[in-house]
Image (spheres, rainbow, N blue to C red):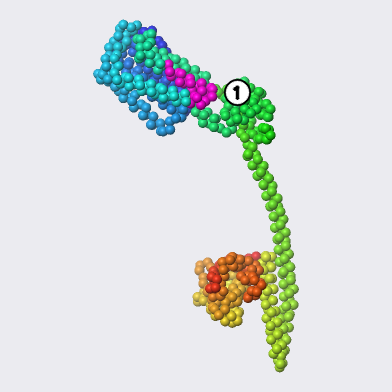
């Protein structure tokens, strides 16, 4: 039945159209990564199948054979319009959903194809089917049913929708991309126009469907686009999205150094001097303020920053020239990009100026630091020397004073003189304490304090401290207690510094507390030994606590202050504590008392500070 076929000259253009359309499948398939390439490849294959099926139908001599070839060609007829709209959506980048969702465009075609395969028994696609032998060849004589007209409406709708997408895109582009897009629209008009003439019987060859000839014209136009305009090689949407929106000026040149393309940024840059025109030469364009660009363009491949004077201002541009090659790797032109780096250049200059200023400030600060350190060392050396010079005669004064008290104490009527000598002795000891504190601070600042680490029995240390501190509590009627767990053991530290710290803290507590209590609590854990001095004295404000450990600082700085002292005791104690690996913390409420906590590691290595 399939061999009931005879040659007919009307089949020649159909076979040619099928061959050309089929051959277009392969170059499009090789470019399948380009937008719309896969859809275009299947469009060509379905068009070839349509032409081939129609050629075989014309040559068939029996009704069953013709119906078989009709059903074959309808595989291409019902799907080609859907593939066309898919191609247009992908090519113009209008499809925003998953590719699987494109199957919605094939629901109606596949239902119609199923109805065609059930004919002539169904009677809704073809109402009547017969043979017409009156024409130049045996042709099908059919009466179309409603589903056929549904296919016509659907196909024309898809065609118009796809053409609209291409025309909309082409209107936004510049040649040759506009010509490329319009070529697509023009190439798809012919087969549908031929089909429309055949269906409406307006053709001078009523027996012949002109659709195959339309596909032949489509094949020619598509082949021309593929060869001359690089259809699918450079999708126009890429130019619209990338080049049209690019902030840098871009110019494309051919091998004859003529301008082929440019973007809006290039127009804005050059139009004030030389309006851009396609086919103008590089020497014609790079004149006046742009003359410095020409030597870089002539180097074929370069990247360099230049200064251009545009109007009354100087601008800086990074010029990049890159060679362009065709698909065979042969030179086809060059690409020139001008990137405005004026703001970046000015920012870099400002940063360089700030860097130089900062370096100058650092140098000045370094000099000032060295001078301050030298002055501090000189001050410390001076205080150490002066304290030593003052301590030596003061010790002699105290000694002679005590000697006089012993001599006068053995004589009668010397009570008045003894009271004066005792007052002088008290003032001398007070002055000696002040000198000792100044000397200790100067040693700390000069880094001349040497630690002598040894095992210290904590209970014995507390007994010595209690012996010294207890008389200090009497003048203000304070009660002093020590709370220490039995068998607290020993620790490795500097006993002299620890003793001085505790005496400073307990002496302050006694001085700032009246008719109250002063307590010393001692405890230890795996790492630290804690000495906590608590009193019920006048307390401290948060502002006073913030500057408490600064040298020469006292809580009461008024001229009529009640409590004497240099303000060095707490600062010295904090330095000593830190040298021993610990720290002094303070908690206080104004008017309710204070708590000073000394945390020291139970073992510290011997070192000099």
Q: In the figure, is residue 346 to the left or right of 79?
A: right
Give the dominant element type of the magenta stretch: helix, strand or loop: helix
Q: In the figure, is residue 591 to the left or right of 41?
A: right
In this orientation, which residue lies closer to the viewer: 212 or 573? 212
- Residue extending farthest to the bottom is 412
Give yes or no for residue 448 being in the magenta stretch.
no
Query: Which image quarter is the N terminus in?
Result: top left
Query: Which image quarter is the C terminus in?
Result: bottom right
What residue do we see at 36% from left, 23% from top? 154
What residue do we see at 40% from left, 31% from top? 99
Q: Position of residue 591 (x, y in %)?
A: 55, 73
Residue 584 image-quadrant placement: bottom right
Give yes or no for residue 176 being in the magenta stretch.
yes
**516 w.r.t. 170: above or below:** below
- Residue extending farthest to the left is 121
Q: In the figure, is residue 38 to the left or right of 588?
A: left
Residue span colored magenta: 169-190
> Tag 1's secondary structure?
loop
């Amino acid at each position: 039945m399939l061999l009931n076929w005879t040659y007919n000259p009307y089949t020649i253009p159909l076979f040619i159209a099928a061959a050309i359309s089929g051959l277009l499948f392969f170059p499009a398939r090789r470019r399948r990564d380009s937008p719309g390439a896969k859809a275009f490849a299947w469009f060509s294959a379905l068009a070839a199948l349509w032409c081939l099926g129609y050629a075989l139908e014309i040559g068939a001599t029996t009704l069953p054979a013709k119906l078989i070839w009709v059903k074959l060609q309808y595989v291409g007829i019902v799907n080609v319009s859907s593939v066309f709209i898919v191609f247009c959506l992908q090519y113009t980048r209008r499809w925003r959903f998953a590719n699987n969702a494109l199957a919605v465009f094939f629901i109606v075609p596949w239902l119609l194809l199923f109805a065609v395969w059930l004919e002539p028994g169904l009677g809704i696609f073809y109402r009547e089917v017969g043979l017409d032998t009156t024409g130049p060849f045996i042709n099908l004589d059919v009466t179309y049913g409603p589903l056929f007209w549904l296919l016509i409406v659907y196909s024309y709708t898809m065609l118009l929708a796809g053409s609209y997408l291409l025309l909309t895109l082409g209107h936004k582009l510049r040649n040759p991309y506009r010509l490329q897009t319009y070529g697509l629209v023009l190439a798809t008009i012919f087969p549908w126009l031929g089909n429309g003439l055949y269906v409406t019987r307006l053709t001078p060859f009523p027996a012949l469907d002109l659709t195959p000839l339309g596909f032949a014209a489509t094949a020619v136009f598509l082949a021309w686009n593929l060869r001359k305009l690089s259809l699918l090689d450079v999708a126009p949407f890429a130019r619209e999205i990338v080049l049209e929106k690019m902030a840098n000026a871009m110019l494309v040149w051919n091998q004859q150094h003529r301008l082929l393309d440019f973007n809006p940024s290039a127009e804005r840059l050059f139009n004030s001097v030389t309006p851009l025109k396609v086919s103008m030469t590089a020497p014609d364009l790079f004149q006046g303020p742009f003359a410095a660009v020409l030597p870089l363009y002539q180097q074929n491949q370069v990247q360099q920053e230049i200064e251009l004077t545009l109007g009354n201002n100087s601008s800086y541009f990074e010029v990049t020239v890159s060679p362009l090659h065709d698909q065979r790797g042969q030179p086809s032109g060059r690409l020139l990009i001008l990137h405005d780096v004026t703001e970046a250049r000015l920012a870099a200059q400002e940063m360089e100026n700030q860097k130089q200023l900062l370096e100058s400030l650092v140098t000045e600060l370094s000099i000032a630091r060295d001078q301050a350190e030298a002055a501090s060392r000189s001050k410390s050396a001076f205080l150490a020397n002066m304290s030593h010079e003052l301590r030596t005669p003061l010790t002699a004064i105290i000694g002679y004073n005590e000697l006089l008290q012993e001599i006068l104490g053995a004589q009668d009527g010397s009570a008045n003189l003894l009271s004066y000598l005792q007052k002088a002795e008290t003032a001398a000891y007070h002055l000696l304490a002040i000198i000792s504190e100044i000397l200790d601070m100067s040693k700390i600042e000069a880094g001349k304090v040497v630690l002598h680490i040894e095992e210290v029995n904590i209970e014995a240390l507390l007994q010595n401290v209690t012996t010294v501190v207890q008389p200090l509590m009497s003048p203000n009627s304070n009660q002093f207690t020590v709370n220490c767990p039995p068998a607290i053991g020993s620790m490795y530290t500097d006993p002299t510094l620890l003793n001085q710290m505790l005496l400073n803290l307990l002496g302050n507590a006694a001085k700032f507390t009246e008719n109250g209590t002063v307590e010393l609590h001692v405890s230890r854990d795996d790492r630290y030994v804690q000495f906590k001095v608590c009193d019920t004295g006048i307390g401290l404000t948060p502002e006073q606590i913030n500057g408490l450990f600064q040298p020469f600082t006292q809580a009461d700085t008024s001229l009529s202050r009640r409590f004497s002292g240099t303000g060095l005791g707490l600062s010295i104690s904090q330095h000593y504590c830190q040298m021993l690996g610990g720290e002094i913390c303070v908690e206080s409420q104004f008017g309710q008392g204070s708590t000073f906590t000394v945390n020291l590691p139970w073992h510290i290595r011997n070192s000099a500070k």
